[in-house]
Each structure stands twice: as C-alpha cells, then as structure tokens.
Image (tube, rainbow, N blue to C red):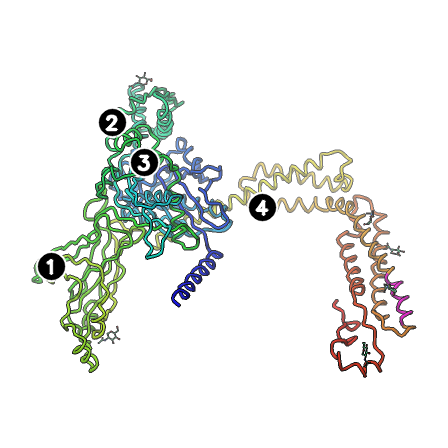
Amino acid sequence: MHQLSFRRVISLVILFAALFESSFAAVLAIDYGSDWIKASLMKPGVPFDVLLNKDSKRKIQSSVAWKKDDRLFSTDAANIASRFPSDSFSSLKYLQGAPYDSDVVSYFTSISTAEILKSSRGTVALKQSDGTEWNSEELIAMQFAYIKSLADDLGGEPVTDVIVTVPPYYTQFERDAVADAVEVAGLRTLALINDGTAVAINYAMTRTFTVPEYHVIYDAGASSTRATVVSFAPAEEGKGKSSGTQISVLGVGYDRATGGTELDRRLREILIDNFTSKHKRDIRKDKRGMAKLWKEAGRVKAILSANSDAMSTVESVAFDIDFKAKVTRAEFERACLDLQGRFARPIDDALARARLTLSDITSVILTGGASRTPMIQTAVKAAVGEERIALNVNADEAAVLGAALHGAALSRQFKTKDIRVSDIIAHDVQASYFATAPTPSAKPRTISTLIFPEGTKHGTRKTLTFKRKEDFALWLDYKNIVFPGFPKEILEVQISGVAEALGNLTERGAVDPVIKATVTLSESGFVSIKEAVAFGEIKDESLTGRLKNLFGGGSTGEQVPESVPSAEGSAAEPASTVKPPSKDAKDFKDRSTIPLTVSTSFAPVPPMTVAEKKAGREKLRAIDNKEAAKVRKEEARNTLEGYLYRLRDLLDDGPETPFKKCSKASEREVLSKEVKNTISWLHDEGEQADTAQLWGKRTMLELLEKPITHRYKEIEAFPQALNTSQMWNWSTRLFLTEARDNLTAEAKAGVQSRWTKEELDALEVTLKEHEVWLNDGVEKQKKMKMNDDPAITTAEMKTRAKALEQHLQRLVKRKAPKPKKAKTTAETNGSSNAGTDEPTGSNKQPGHDEL
Ligand SMILES: *[C@@H]1O[C@H](CO)[C@@H](O)[C@H](O)[C@H]1NC(C)=O
Ligand SMILES: *[C@@H]1O[C@H](CO)[C@@H](O)[C@H](O)[C@H]1NC(C)=O
Ligand SMILES: *[C@@H]1O[C@H](CO)[C@@H](O)[C@H](O)[C@H]1NC(C)=O
Ligand SMILES: *[C@@H]1O[C@H](CO)[C@@H](O)[C@H](O)[C@H]1NC(C)=O
Ligand SMILES: *[C@@H]1O[C@H](CO)[C@@H](O)[C@H](O)[C@H]1NC(C)=O
Ligand SMILES: *[C@@H]1O[C@H](CO)[C@@H](O)[C@H](O)[C@H]1NC(C)=O
C-alpha cells in the first residue's frame, strides 16, 4: 500500500518535471569576474558547454565602452580603452555595492581611468565623456544583458532565469548589487552561488565518494584570492542507498587585496617609475598613457610567466614619447615581495575556520586565472606541498559549469546527479534592538545578539522572541567591519501593530503573549526579517478543555519554549529555532498567532529601489532600441547601396542581356537618371537620411526596374505554363468525348452513369472558356515584342489551368455507382442489408459537388 502511493507520488513529480520542461526550461549561469565573464546555458537540446561570444571565444572580457555613439562589449570595449579612456569601463566588479568612500573605491580609481561620482544611494556612479551617468549596477546589467542576448541566440528563445557566482565573502550589499544588476538586465535571479562552492559542484559531478573527503578550492582571481574548504561525502538517504554526494562548505578564507589585478598594478608601477625617471614627465596625469600602460602591464606580466625578462615597448605612450623598458621577473617579484606571504594565507584561514589541518586535506584544487602565475603557484605549493596540488580542474570554467549544474538542479526542470550543497555565511551577523528603558527618561540600552555566527549554514531560519508591549525596531548588522568603508548596518526592521495584537490575545485569555520575529539566512546568503507575529497560548475554558486538562496531565503554567529577553534587557540570548508545539500541549491549548506588520529599510547603503531598477531597465531598453534602429538603418542603407550597384551593372552591360532586350530605351534612360541621382544622394545625404527614406528610395527604383525584370521572367516561364494549360485542355477534351460516348451507351443499356449530361455540359463550358481565353492570349502574345509587357501572365495561365484541372478531377474521381438492383430482388432480399447498400444514398447527388 505504502509502496504504491509512494510510487504514485514519484511519478507525479516526474510528470510535473516534464510539463515544466516544455515551457521554460533554461537556466543561464554567469561567472562574473572583474576581468572576465564566463557563461553557460543549460537548456534541453543545447549541448552543455560554456557560452561562446560572437567571436567564438570561451570567455568574455568584463568591459563595456562607448566609441562615440557605438556601445561595445568584451574585447572590443577593452581594446579602445587607450583611445577613449573616459568611455571605457572595466573592473566594475570592484564597485559592486561599494560605498563611495570605501577603500575599494579608491583602489578602483588607482587602476581605472573612468570618472566616478557618488550615486544617490551613496555608491558609485560612472560618467561618460559626454556627461551621461550610469550607476555601476547599470553598466554591469548591460554586460549581463549582452550575455543574455548570446544565450537567447543560442537557445532560440529568451532566457529568464540566471544563477550568478559571487565570492564567498560577499556582503549583503554586494549580493544586492548583483541581484539588482540581474533585474535591470531583464533577468531573474534564480540564485547566487559562492564561486568556490560552484567549483566543488563541478568537481563532484564526475566523481563518486564512498568515504568523506576534504578538499580546498583555491581561487586566485583578478580582484581577490580565496580558499574554500569543502567536504564531499556520500549523501545520506534514509535507509535506501544513494549515489548522490553531499557537499558541505566548512570554512572560507580570503584576501580582498591580493589578486591578478594587483599584480598588474605593481607591474604598471614599474613601467611608470621607469618612464618618470627617464623622461621626467608625469604620465599619471595622462589618461590615455595610463590606459596604454595598463594594457602593457598585463602583456608583460604574461610574458614574465614564462620568461625571466620581457621587453616593454609602447609607441607614443604619452607626450609623443615612445616607451621602451626591460623588466625582469626578479624585478617584478621584488615589487610583489609583500604579497608573497599573502597568497597562501586564505588556505590557512579557511582550514582554521573549518577546524581542520592540512593533513586532513586530500587535495588543493587550483582555479582562477591568476592561479597560473608562477609567483602564486610557487607560494601555494610551498604552503601545502606540491603533492596536494590538483591541476586537473579547468581553472577558468569550473565555476561557471558548476553554477549551471546547480542552477539546473534548483530549477527542478532537469534530471541531474543528486548533489546536495550546504554553504555557509562568511561573516558574523547580529540582531540589535533597544532594551526597554527602566524609566521613561533613561537612555535606552542597545542589546546585540549574535544570530548567524560566521559558518552558519545558508537556508537557516531563527526565531527571536521578545516580551514587548509596544511597536519596536530591530537591526541586522555585521558584528565587525567586514571591509574598510563598508557599513555594519545591513537593514532595519520596524515591527508594528504590537499593542493591538497583544490586546487581542489577552482578551482571548492568552497567558504571557510574546512577539516572535523570524530571521532568515537564504540559500543565496541574504539575511532578512520577513515575518513577525504576536504569539500566545489560549486556555480552553470549555468543559471538554477542562476535562482534557484534568486527565491529560500537563501543567497549565507551561513555559514558552524560547528563552525570552526580559523587559529589563538581561543578557539572555534570544536566538533559538522554533520548536513545534508538543503534542500534549496541543490537546488543551489553542496556540494563537497574529501576524504583525514588518517594514524593512536599508541604511546607509540601500539596494536599488523598485523604481530605480525600473528606471535603469528603461535606460537600457532605450539604448537597445536605439541600437536596433541603427542596425535597421544600416541594413536599409546597405540594401539600397547594393541595389544601386546592381542596377548600374544591368544598365552598363552589353546590348544582348535580357535586361536590355526586355527594356525600352526610354525606360533605361529614366532608370539610369534615377540611379545616378540616388547614388549621389546617398553619398551626400545618406548619413542623415532615416530608415524610411532609404527604403523609399529603393521602392521608387524598384517601380522602374521591376516591370523590365518581370518581362524576361515571363518570357522564361511562358513555354512551361503554356504546356501545362494545353495539357489540361487536351485531357479535358479527351475525357469529355469518352464520357459522352459512355453516357449514350449506358442510357441505351438502362445502366446508371457516373455523371449526368448536365455535369458534362458544365465541364465543356469551362473548357471552352479556357480555350478561348488561352487562344486569345497566345495570339496577342505572339504579336508582342520582348520589351512590351506580356499580354497574358503565366500566373494567370496557371490559375486558369488549375481551375480547369479541378473541375475535371471532380468528375474523374467520382466513384462508379453500385449496379442498380432490380426492384423484385430488392424486395425479397432488401431487409438483410438495408441501409448499407443504398445505391445513391451514399453517393453525392449530381450538382452537389463541392465547388
Ligand atoms: C628603465 O628601463 C631602461 C631600459 O630597460 C633601463 O635602461 C633603465 O635603467 C630603467 N630605468 C629605471 C629607473 O628603472
Ligand atoms: C482577534 O483577532 C482575530 C483574528 O485575527 C479576530 O477574528 C478577532 O475578532 C480578534 N478579537 C479581538 C477581541 O480583537
Ligand atoms: C510539355 O510537357 C511534356 C510532358 O511533360 C514534355 O514532354 C514536353 O517536352 C513539354 N514541352 C514543353 C514545350 O515544355
Ligand atoms: C467509358 O467506358 C469504358 C468501358 O466501360 C471505361 O473503360 C472508361 O473508363 C469509360 N470512360 C469514361 C471517361 O467514363
Ligand atoms: C485545346 O485542345 C484542342 C483539342 O485538343 C485544340 O484543338 C486546341 O487548339 C487547344 N487549344 C489551345 C489553346 O491549346
Ligand atoms: C439474396 O441475394 C443474394 C446475392 O445478392 C443471392 O445470392 C440470394 O440468393 C438472394 N436471396 C433471395 C432470397 O433472393
């Protein structure tokens, strides 16, 4: 029985999955790095791989730029940075959720030539040279939308759901910035996933773990270095055996100031120093020069990865000076000396937080573009031992592929390997509130309670219980400054309606009602308070209630399970998960909850408001529309241009061409004049002309050209059309002769015929009409010259032949009537097969044919 219903549930689940699959089964994964974006589309029928950009590249540079009016992405955008240093925006990841005054923003200004401003939300906006301002989310949204357009093209329909990787240390502010950019791009955040965790998922996809193993995912990216300690274990599945894997993140470590970008910056400093000392000019003031040296630093760094020295040469770097310098690897490493001890430290930190040591670790998996830098590899090898290094993971793509697999599993629209993921928060989060003042004049004391200590699992909910009589506020904060210049305050929640709700509960007989607020740490690492209730246990004063009370045991003075911060504000920790009410208590008590109003405000770094996101979306749409219009105009222009040259060739070619033979001199003269005029118009005014004008010119020329082309197309098609017409003429004639003969013979024999005389006469009429029309047309056509318009068109010949054919076929296809039985036979034998053998009943009556 149980078995059966269980199966039914399973098959229902599969059915639902199948239903979904047909409607919107696509998940886009984006690994958004500060240098490179990788993306992957998970969609039935699309091979699972990373998304290729328009140049078939597997990674896309995280840049957006404007070359005058043209918006460029990826490499095209990065490449024009030295020409348009104020209109080229890269390394925007640094700005996600960052307060304008934070250290990371001043770092950004040291590597970028972009002009920054303080946004209305206290974050960073960027300004183009023409004065247009964008907040960083909008510029990132453009890149997301660009990725989306690639995915839409690949999948053949628009994708909506996206999963984006974030570094594990990302704060709420930064996570909000990612989710906001996703929304502005017209996508929906299915989830955010920590990048180390995504790599772990990708790693587990092709492996089975029979015993738990611990690994470190070491990710050396452009903007930071991070390490994630994960355990891989067989998934526990009740009694049944499971082939699944449980991935648990046990600890993370990170250095937000060490990464590929910092190495580039140090290298550029070497180049700048050399330039300054040699040429005594301040290149730092020259944006183009700085942008050129930035690109050069990246190039030289790559050379130094494989060589002990590199020659740097930049033509006309600034002040018309050609720059030339030799940089040695030793020199570069000396400039990075202070960083070397920091490369491997995230591994130690992550291990310490996981309460593990290196000896517990099976392997250290290296990922991230900067993990190929010899300096970093050497440092990590020295720290963990070369034998532990695993290089068998695709350093660039493991995170995005893992994210896509996770997104597919979350969307529940795909059958994926059973991989369960448990991730953690990297920072202590506390809840704070004012203690109720002992006297009205006393200054309220703030009570803070650690609610999600660093290492708390994503997906945790906690309930805070308060003895409050009035509305009150609650704050969620980071316990410590998590990043210089970032606020601690995450959000403030106002809980209102308390007095009324408590009044209600008390009136109904509740004992010591309390306020409960539920704090959630989501799977994507966001904290929030969405729900608060007044809660009380109401004594059942009815007779049955009292009887139950008497016999059911249980004390009437049962404690509220949660510890309660007292009105005086004792240090008691209120955090505790909600326990389901015990069964006994339920029997005699009515536990009643009344929802309270919860309003959240964000300060001092709020995420974008709905209105701001909508406005951002409109701005992006406006650009898209402008670009689409431009593409259409370009197309109209190209089409017109191509057409003009084709016409010119037709007019210029020798006298024996069909075009010449089929046109009159006067026609060619007019056309030639218009072609000349239009070519010069296109040259002089084509730039300013709008799409409609361009198409208009084309239509005007077509009106002159089409009739000529039509003539020789008709001449070509005529013999075949005539043949067809004659064939049906001839077939019909043949049929009619024979059918009339048969009709006569059958009438004589008293046998029923397939057709009536009237039907044959009607066909004859159609045939005659056709013949007359055709004869007439052919006669006229014979007299026509090649450059005259044809007397009859092949299209009409076809239509008329078709009509004749159909008329004929209707009669030909008619079934022969069943031989009519003699009346006497019918009488004696009729009853046995009445209704099934009526001679005319099932046949169509003459004249009732479909027409
Ligand atoms: C700059 O580079 C040139 C060429 O490699 C070298 O001769 C010179 O000593 C360097 N100057 C400084 C200050 O590093
Ligand atoms: C208490 O609240 C409940 C539901 O919220 C409502 O039905 C009831 O009328 C209220 N009672 C009082 C006394 O306000
Ligand atoms: C007409 O059609 C017949 C049969 O399809 C073919 O044999 C004949 O060559 C055609 N004649 C012309 C002029 O196309
Ligand atoms: C005329 O009758 C003959 C002999 O029954 C038959 O073969 C032929 O198909 C008939 N033709 C038409 C057009 O009905
Ligand atoms: C139609 O067919 C008849 C008999 O086959 C023939 O005499 C006549 O010339 C044909 N008409 C045309 C226009 O082909
Ligand atoms: C009824 O008709 C069938 C053939 O249609 C014939 O074999 C049979 O003899 C007939 N029966 C009578 C009673 O006429």
Would you name the residue on which mark 2 appears?
A: 337
Taking the image as four quarters, which one is ligand 1 found in? top left
The amino acid type of the residue labelled 1 equals Gly
Q: Earlier in the sequence, mark 4 or mark 2?
A: 2
- Main SS type for the magenta part? helix
Give yes or no for contact between labels 2 and 1 (Cβ–Cβ under 8 Å). no
Disc marking residue 569? 1
- For the residues labelled 2 and 3, the Cα–Cα distance comes to 17 Å
Q: Earlier in the sequence, mark 1 or mark 4?
A: 1
Location of residue 579 with respect to 299 vertically, above or below = below
Disc marking residue 220? 3
- For the residues labelled 2 and 1, the Cα–Cα distance comes to 51 Å
- For the residues labelled 4 and 2, the Cα–Cα distance comes to 65 Å
Location of residue 123 with respect to 81 vertically, above or below = below
Mark 3 or 1, which is nearer the eye? 3
Q: Which residues are magenta?
A: 735-746
SS at mark 4 in the image: helix
Judged left or right of residue 47, residue 419 is left
Residue 135 visible here: no
The amino acid type of the residue labelled 2 equals Leu
Give yes or no for contact between labels 3 and 4 (Cβ–Cβ under 8 Å). no
Judged left or right of residue 770, residue 246 is left
Give yes or no for contact between labels 1 and 4 (Cβ–Cβ under 8 Å). no
Disc marking residue 693? 4
The amino acid type of the residue labelled 4 equals Gln
